[in-house]
Amino acid sequence: MRADKAKVSRLLRTARGQLDGILRMIEEDRYCIDILNQLLASEAVLRRAEREVLRAHMEGCVTEAFQHADEDERAEKIAEMIRTVEKMQR
């Protein structure tokens, strides 16, 4: 992985902590909107981690494929990116 490992790890640890907190909130029967707000915050942190990994992939792996790979490999990188972006939009 070419992404900033420290940054991605920090973001994922934050999301894990948030999820642990959400589970406690559910066990404590907290107010639904408070739980939803924490879920949204967790999703936002995960999206930031996604963007960091995607950025590194584009700057590293995809750029390298376009500089050094044959046309079939470049086409596969494009198809791979399209599939990934489509999944991210769901």
Image (cartoon, helix red, strand yellow):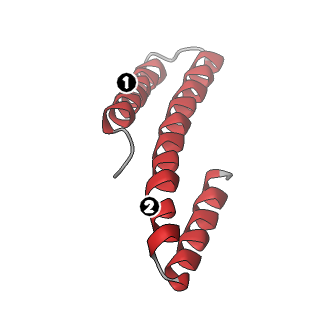
Where residue 23 sits, quadrant-wise, is top left
Which residue ends up furthest to the front in the rendered image?
67
Estimate the x, y position of residue 2 in percent, counting from the top left. Answer: 36, 49
Q: In this image, 17 relative to 48: left or right?
A: left
Instruction: Identify which residue is drawn at 42% across, 22% down.
Output: 27
Estimate the x, y position of residue 67 in percent, counting from the top left. Answer: 49, 68
Instruction: Identify which residue is drawn at 38% across, 31% down.
Output: 7
Element type where label 2 sits in the image: helix
Element type where label 1 sits in the image: helix
Q: Amino acid at mark 1?
A: Gly
Q: Residues within 10 Å of mark 2 (few under 14, many from 20)?
A: some
Give above or below for 25 relative to 45: above
Residue 17: numbered disc? 1
Residue 61: numbered disc? 2
Where residue 5 sits, quadrant-wise, is top left
Instruction: Identify which residue is drawn at 41% across, 30% down.
Output: 11
Estimate the x, y position of residue 44 in percent, counting from the top left. Answer: 57, 31
Q: CA distance from mark 1 to mark 2?
A: 31 Å
Q: Nearer the viewer, residue 24 or 67?
A: 67
In front: mark 1 or mark 2?
A: 2
Q: Amino acid at mark 2?
A: Cys
Estimate the x, y position of residue 13 in percent, counting from the top left. Answer: 34, 29
Residue 7: numbered disc? none
Q: Nearer the viewer, residue 17 or 61?
A: 61
Q: Nearer the viewer, residue 7 or 39?
A: 7
Give above or below for 24 relative to 57: above
Q: Residues within 10 Å of mark 1 (few under 14, many from 20)?
A: few
